[in-house]
Amino acid sequence: MNMPRFWREKQGRYNLVGNRCTNCGTYYFPKRDICPKCHRKSIGKMEEVRFKGTGKVVSWTIVHDAHPDYKDMRPYIMAIIELEEGPRLTGQIVDCSLDEIHTGMRVRDTFRKLSEDGKDGVIFYGYKFRPVKE
Amino acid sequence: MKAGIVSYGAYVPKYRIRPEEIGRVWGEDGATRGKGLGIMSKSIPSPDEDVITIAVEAARSALLRAGIDPQDIGAIYTGSESHPYAVKPTSSVVAEAILAAPDMTAADYEFACKAGTAALQNVLGLVNTGWIKYGMAIGADTSQGAPGDPLEYSASAGGAAFIAGTERIIAKINGMYSYTTDTPDFWRREGQAYPSHGGRFTGEPAYFKHVLTAARRMMELEGTEAKDYDYVVLHQPNGKFPRRAAAKLGFTDEQLAPGLLTPRIGNTYSGAVPLGLSAVLDIAKPGDRILVTSFGSGAGSDAFDISVTDEMERFNRSAGPLVEDMINVPEEYYVDYATYVKFRGKIRRKGD
């Protein structure tokens, strides 16, 4: 991962900071400069929002052919999560058995290591998701 | 003291290993070793967990329970002996990850297993002088034991965070006392992956001398005896030492048990006393009095005399996970030794 880019985007990855168009009320993650629905009407009307971090799994898959950074955790679960406020995003589901994962599962964000730039490089942190008791 | 604890949060990773499994690999009777140490299982961080992630989870839980604005936190200190970076603070990542940065101070502490309580003393001090409104102290570790070393049976992972403030205090600090000497019982030289220890030397001249002296002196200063406390939380490198120390101080098993977690999750080092105190605060009622004494090799002990206030009735404990709920995990989270060494990065790989 590119360090300056990660650093610029860290509030999104650390704290699920996105934004909301105050013209139409739609929430976005990651942040957008303008609302794709309202176009120029949204200029200057995009408001920063920290998402609550709770949501549900809308689709998931079990990854066996892992990205090198995730090899130690394979097989692992990747899912599309719909946050309570509306936006959908992709994230790993941790502390969840492969039998347990299901569509509609309630999850919340958790702070984990995403990758590292080698043994002597920077460590990148950010959101993943874990099941919440229903 | 004006300053007290206004909130706390804890975190224990979900994976576990049993001493039987460690002994199986090293040709030892793991069950007997575990019994001798008073440890039935220990926690293991997942490959994507480290002191920073543990500290952030504990800090977020403390913030949610307190319901305070993170921008009001003026200092974050994290004590650990397994900070992910040798140079680059854990505390600055925590600060960003709880939206407390940038108008604040932060630093990392090291004093073997007592760095977390040293951090707590410091935030209490800063709050007490009025220099900051709230301060956060964290003790967390993902402690290391060399393959085949007796430490492998105990070295585990976890942590807890405390927020100090002057309003809506749930745990009042009646007094603090520290006892420090130069005692080489346990150490890790710069650049070494695993710590070294003085074997039996870690007992009498180190753990017992410091813990017993600090706890006794704390009680002398407060004019109290063991029976005046509802709970006692002592550093717990294994399940055996704190039991013996508590008995010598005149405490009963009932006073010690709620804050004694090592038998089920191992020694979480800088996280041990903070987690033990969190487990006690999870069940404590207004009026309860707690004696806390940490121990850090090298060596020193920090003692705290704490009273739970009426504010505890209004405190939103359920906004964060209880320690007991994090300790109990399903059987599928108990892993074998091979998985353990993979998770802990003990396998030498290409390019290492």
Image: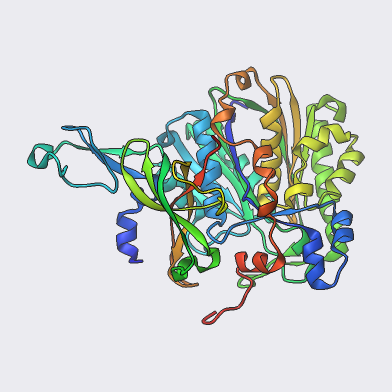
Q: Quadrant of the N terminus of chain A?
A: bottom left
Q: Nearer the viewer, residue B170 or B97?
A: B97
Q: Nearer the viewer, residue B32 or A63?
A: A63
Residue B102 seen in the current view: no
Residue A61 lies in quadrant: bottom left
Classify B46 as above or below A111.
below
Where's residue B25, x and y in %?
Answer: 78, 71
Residue at 42% from the left image edge and 32% from the top image edge: B69
Is residue A33 found left or right of B12 in the rendered image? left
Is residue B349 found left or right of A24 in the rendered image? right
Q: Nearer the viewer, residue A64 or A46?
A: A64
Q: Quadrant of the C terminus of chain A?
A: top right
Residue A24 lies in quadrant: top left
The residue furthest left is A40
Classify B16 as above or below B287.
below
Where's residue B315, x and y in %?
Answer: 57, 23
